[in-house]
């Protein structure tokens, strides 16, 4: 059997290696139009900024190493320009010579990936407007940094690549402006969770401009002028990172069925509409485990699994791809942001019923030195408590918790089952009640009716005619230093509340807040059992302040109650 694979990197290279492990006698050919067959795509920004020093560290396999270890015929700088499904041939162009020839196949795997989007703006096609998608792209940017010594850079786009490029260019000593069209960076995150990210990035020196549309570029012969409405930013280096689109042109010309946003439609075995042609990676549509709908998930983990599944099916194994939930994580200087499953925007768009809880936990036991805090937002099904999605922003231990929650979503666990997870504990690593357990406890309290909650975006709309009471149960020092959520808030510290209940009108609903939502929950339990109608501010003053105001980031670790550690 002869298998031709178009494209390497994650999906294609994984498929090739798996095919060889399953079939020692198959003839396997990889056609790769770039000069690199298997490389760490996710590491490209770190090389551009100099964090990864060696170019060889980016290449996981070379054509020679593939040949020696797997006996695979790897042809770099070889572009597949046409597929003839009836004749079972691929037309290949050697980019170094221009020669074209036909390559036959019994089975074909498409792994073309995605291409960086260049929006149709004036000047966007200039050679001095860079994108980052291939090793060649990162080599070009690294060379500019090392030889031209630019002082400034503008990055357009606040997704994963844009943020990683911004961080790494700042690491290389550049002053960086990041321009984002929408109101928040990292589209998988909800705007309220992204509020702390914005504050932190600005504290690191990033010139972050949200709700800002780029209208064009002017190439100044090296430097670039980035046009933003009536204003402009002149910069030594400009990078476009506004997203990627499936590179499905070859499949379309071959008559293969397409899916969402021009992606390649495949079945659970990664077969296209032609039974002898498979497709994997960023160019294919998949089923979203969060919504059950078709979607695009351009991540390395799914691409690797899809390559393995395609190889399995070609070799007679019954592997199937069940879908992706889009679990992701990103390093932003010392901060980590991660998400998995549903966010609110997607849930609303798909008509999925959900509720949410925001918790604030230390990365490990707060009495052990070095504890750092994380904000955890968890979406759940109010009918049965099943976990639908999670987003975490913090420093230490974020990746650990998002992985647990990703597994919980995949397994269909409920909030009650989160409380029962037996997770590893020692003071340097966690708390006896892990942040994942705590999310479960809070959700169960909400579902059991032990606490009613309101959210950050509802505070401004609460009546101001004296018909409700805003109660802040932080200490007087906190209340004065941090400020209230609203000017008419009454400050009664939690520890004084039982003795000062007479100061509150039992006929008025009470909206309670503290720093993190913990003390205000305790206050609500006291008030409810004394006949008050009360509601707890989810996430407390801390979450509200990042979501509703543009406050300066405070990196000092604190106990969830707000006390400095």
Image (tube, rainbow, N blue to C red):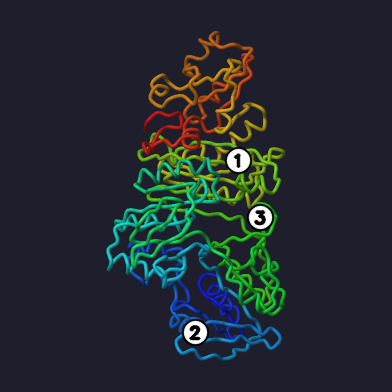
First along the sequence among labels 1 and 2: 2
Q: Circle 1 — which element?
A: helix
Q: Are marks 3 and 1 in contact (CB under 8 Å)?
A: no
Q: Residue at label 3?
A: 289
Q: Is residue 25 left or right of residue 125?
A: right
Q: Are marks 1 and 2 in contact (CB under 8 Å)?
A: no
Q: Residue at label 2?
A: 75
**Image vertical order of residue 438 relative to residue 67, above or below:** above
Q: Nearer the viewer, mark 3 or mark 1?
A: 3
First along the sequence among labels 3 and 1: 3
Task: Specify the quadrant that holds the C terminus.
Answer: top left
Q: Residues within 10 Å of mark 2 (few under 14, many from 20)?
A: many
Q: Position of residue 339 (x, y in %)?
A: 54, 49
Q: Are marks 2 and 3 in contact (CB under 8 Å)?
A: no
Using the rendered view, name the quadrant where residue 299 is placed. Answer: bottom right
- Real-space Cα separation, disc 1 to disc 2, in angstroms: 52 Å
Q: Is residue 313 left or right of residue 475?
A: right
Q: Residue at position x 35%, y 38% from top?
A: 369
Q: Is residue 428 left or right of residue 315?
A: left
- Real-space Cα separation, disc 3 to disc 1, in angstroms: 24 Å
Closer to the camera, 180 or 298? Answer: 180
Q: Circle 2 — which element?
A: strand
Q: Residue at position x 68%, y 59% from top?
A: 294
**Image vertical order of residue 478 relative to residue 21, above or below:** above
């Amino acid at each position: 059997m002869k298998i031709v694979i178009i494209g390497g990197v994650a999906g294609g290279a994984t498929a090739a290696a798996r095919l060889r492990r399953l079939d020692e006698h198959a003839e396997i050919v990889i056609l790769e139009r770039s000069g690199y067959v298997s490389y760490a795509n996710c590491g490209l920004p770190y090389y551009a900024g100099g964090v990864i020093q060696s170019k060889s560290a980016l290449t996981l396999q070379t054509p020679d190493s593939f040949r020696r270890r797997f006996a695979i015929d790897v042809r770099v700088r070889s572009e597949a320009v046409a597929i003839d499904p009836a004749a079972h041939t691929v037309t290949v162009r050697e980019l170094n010579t221009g020669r074209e020839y036909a390559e036959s196949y019994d089975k074909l795997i498409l792994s073309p990936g995605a291409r960086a989007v260049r929006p149709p703006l004036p000047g966007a096609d200039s050679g001095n407007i860079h994108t980052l998608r291939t090793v060649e792209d990162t080599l070009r940017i690294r060379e500019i940094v090392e030889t031209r010594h630019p002082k400034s850079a503008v990055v357009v786009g606040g997704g994963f690549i844009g943020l990683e490029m911004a961080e790494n260019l700042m690491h290389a000593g550049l002053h960086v402006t990041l321009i984002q069209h929408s109101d928040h960076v990292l589209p998988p995150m909800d705007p309220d969770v992204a509020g702390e990210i914005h504050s932190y990035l600005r504290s690191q020196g990033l010139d972050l401009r949200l709700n800002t549309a780029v209208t064009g570029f002017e190439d100044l012969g090296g430097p670039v002028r980035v046009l933003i409405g009536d204003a402009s930013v002149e910069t030594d280096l400009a990078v476009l990172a506004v997203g990627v689109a499936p590179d499905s042109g070859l499949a379309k010309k071959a008559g293969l069925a397409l899916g969402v946003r021009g992606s390649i439609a495949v079945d659970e075995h990664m077969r296209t509409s032609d039974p002898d042609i498979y497709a994997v990676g960023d160019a294919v549509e998949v089923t979203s485990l969060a919504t059950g709908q078709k979607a695009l998930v351009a991540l390395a983990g799914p691409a690797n699994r899809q390559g393995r599944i395609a190889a399995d099916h070609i070799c007679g194994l019954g592997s199937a791809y069940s879908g992706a939930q889009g679990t992701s994580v990103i390093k932003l200087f010392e901060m980590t942001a991660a998400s998995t499953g549903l966010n609110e925007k997607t849930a609303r768009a798909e008509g999925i019923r959900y509720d949410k809880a925001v918790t604030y936990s230390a990365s490990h036991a707060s009495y052990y030195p070095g504890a750092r805090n994380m904000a955890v937002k968890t979406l759940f099904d109010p009918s049965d408590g099943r976990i639908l999605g999670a987003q975490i922003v913090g420093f230490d231990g974020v990746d650990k918790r998002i992985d647990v929650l990703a597994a919980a979503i995949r397994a269909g666990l409920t909030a009650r089952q989160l409380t029962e997870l037996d997770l590893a504990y020692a003071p340097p690593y966690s708390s006896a009640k892990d942040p994942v357990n705590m999310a479960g406890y809070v959700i169960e309290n909400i579902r059991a009716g032990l606490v009613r909650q309101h959210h950050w975006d509802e505070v401004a709309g609460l009546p101001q005619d004296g018909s409700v009471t805003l109660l802040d149960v932080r200490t007087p020092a906190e209340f004065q230093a941090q400020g209230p959520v609203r000017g008419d808030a009454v400050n009664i510290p939690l520890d004084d509340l039982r003795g000062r209940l007479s100061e509150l009108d039992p006929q008025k609903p009470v909206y309670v807040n503290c720093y993190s939502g913990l003390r205000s929950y305790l206050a609500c339990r006291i008030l409810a059992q004394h006949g008050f109608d009360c509601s707890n501010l989810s996430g407390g003053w801390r979450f509200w302040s990042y979501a509703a105001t543009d406050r300066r980031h405070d990196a000092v670790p604190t106990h969830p109650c707000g006390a400095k550690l």
